Image (cartoon, grey):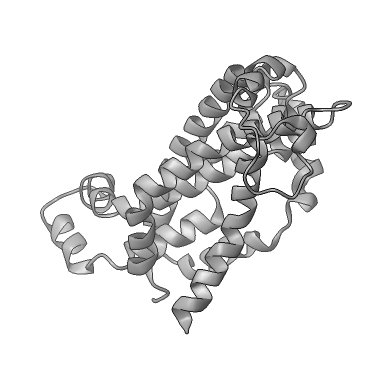
Amino acid sequence: MIFSLLTLLAVMFIIPFLWILSTSLKPESAVFSFQWLPETWKFDNYLKVFEKIPFLLYMKNSIVISLITIIGTVLSSSIVAYAFGCLEWPGRNTIFIFVIATMMLPLQVIMIPLFIMFKELGWLNTIKPLTIPAFFGGGAFNIFLLRQFFKSIPKSLLDAARIDGCSEFRIYWSIVIPLAKPALATVAILTFMFTWNDFLGPLIYLSEKAQGTLALGIAQYAGQMNPEYSVLMAASVLMMLPVIIIFFLFQRYFIQAFTMSGIKE
């Protein structure tokens, strides 16, 4: 029964992607026809993407922003999680509760204060608002996920390292980080997916077309007068490919991290 339900859900989730893929191969005149397989296969729709949209420029910008954000998020969230999960200090659990509580704040609440702050710093129309914050904590959910994984590491192993004279940074870097590769890979994947698909951030902070990302560029093309929807779907497929490929390459780390983390104290 459970497998039948999961199969049904999988089919429901994959149907929109298959429809996008099918539409990307149709001639423009058949875009709104209810045909799963196009009568005429228009592979040149994918070539038109590079004519209608500066796709390579947007892809380069998206890759740069994603890589910087991943590095900052993985480093900062793992350091904070180590402090919460592997060190004993007064008020640790109370402060951790406040960190988790920040997940309840919707983005709309902090959007204007953040915009004003970045404006005063002179960061508008640069990638700094989209990348630099990642180096300051890495996000409450990532901290929570890594903390739970770190707490699964035997405390005796860390105490033995301390007895041998290892500093806390040495323990973090040489013992905890190598053991936490599945969790770190999961944080990297989730960060990449969010950053790669982020539309609101680039829309707010980037005003020059040359600095646009794929999500922003495709949305701008969709908002033009009479866009070619077959080309738009082709661009969407090209944008989704890196996310799909990366997830399938690293899905075992993704599953392992959630399996091993657990919700325990």
- Single out the residue that lies furthest toward the right: 225
**Residue 86 lies in quadrant:** bottom left
- Residue 166 x/y as whole percent: 17, 49
Q: Which residue is drawn at 44% across and 61% down?
A: 145
| Depicted 49 relative to depicted 37: above or below | above
- Single out the residue that lies furthest toward the front: 39
In front: 70, or 160?
A: 70
- Residue 234 x/y as whole percent: 63, 32
Taking the image as shown, residue 254 lies to the left or right of residue 144, namely left
Taking the image as shown, residue 144 lies to the left or right of residue 114, namely left
In front: 241, or 233?
A: 233
**Residue 100 lies in quadrant:** bottom right
Residue 255 appears in the figure: yes
Residue 204 appears in the figure: no
Q: Which residue is drawn at 60% across and 41% down?
A: 21
- Residue 244 x/y as whole percent: 48, 44
In front: 66, or 171?
A: 66
- Single out the residue that lies furthest toward the bottom: 1
Q: Which residue is drawn at 30% across and 54% down?
A: 180
| Depicted 252 relative to depicted 126: above or below | below
Can you say which quadrant of the picture contains the C terminus? bottom left
Q: Residue at x 52, y 25 (%)?
A: 64
| Depicted 28 relative to depicted 52: above or below | below
- Residue 78 x/y as whole percent: 40, 49
- Single out the residue that lies furthest toward the left: 164
**Residue 198 lies in quadrant:** top right
In front: 198, or 90?
A: 198
| Depicted 136 relative to depicted 34: above or below | above
How many numbered marks are there? 0
Taking the image as shown, residue 45 lies to the left or right of residue 192, namely right
